[in-house]
Image: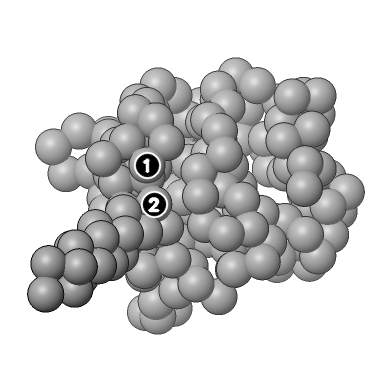
Amino acid sequence: MRIFLLVLAFGTICSTLHAQTSLYDIAIDSSGTNSVINLNTLQGKKILIVNADDSDTSLTAQIRELKQLLLLYKGRLSIVIIPSGSFSGQTNTNTLQQILNARADGNPFIVTGLMSVKGADISMLYQWLTQKSKNGVLDSEVMRPFQKYLINESGRLMGVFSGKLTTSNTALKNAIARQ
């Protein structure tokens, strides 16, 4: 009986730990389509999650670089762009329109609805990305627009990259290429 209880307790602990370290259970609103993006559909690919905000003047350059990154890792990488007013305090319609225009040009970015990436109203996705208790890897803070979170093929957080960092950065490319 004791062994059974130990096995049962161990199984419960393991399933709880798994739930804390995978983001595949999170569903987020899609931009402008009144639909939901299930992140579990991205299993088997690396995922780069990038917040975008009107307060950053490098939006056009960042979108161009993200396009190049998608082409470089075609079929192995998905890029999820999160429009956010967390830095500008605005509704971010200009940012969202530029991202949607880039997507219309044949770039398969996944674009979410407007989302808070920090503060008291932080979204469930960014709670997972920034809290070790949820992602199982590290605590972080979103410091600026275009901060990048890299997720591996199994849904585990691999790393956080500064918003100042361009997508041509060797460390980012090496992390994406890593098996």
Q: Residue at x 52, y 57 (%)?
A: 155
Locate residue 38, reporting x and y percent: 45, 74
Q: Residue at x 61, y 35 (%)?
A: 59
How crowded is the residue under tag 1: few (<14 C-alpha within 10 Å), some, or many (20+)? Answer: some
Specify the amino acid type for callout 2. Thr
In the image, taking residue 174 as reference, residue 11 lies left or right, namely left
Specify the amino acid type for callout 1. Gly
How crowded is the residue under tag 2: few (<14 C-alpha within 10 Å), some, or many (20+)? Answer: many
- Tell me which corner region of the image, top left, top right, bottom left or bottom right, holds residue 84: top left
Looking at this view, is 109 or 20 the one in front?
20
Q: Residue at x 72, y 56 (%)?
A: 77
Up/down of 31 relative to 78, above or below: below
Up/down of 101 relative to 37, above or below: above
In contact (CB < 8 Å): disc 2 and disc 1: yes
Residue 158 visible? The answer is yes
Image quarter where the N terminus lies is bottom left
* Residue position for label 1: 136
Q: Disc 2 and disc 1: Cα gap in Å?
A: 5 Å
Tag shown at residue 21: 2
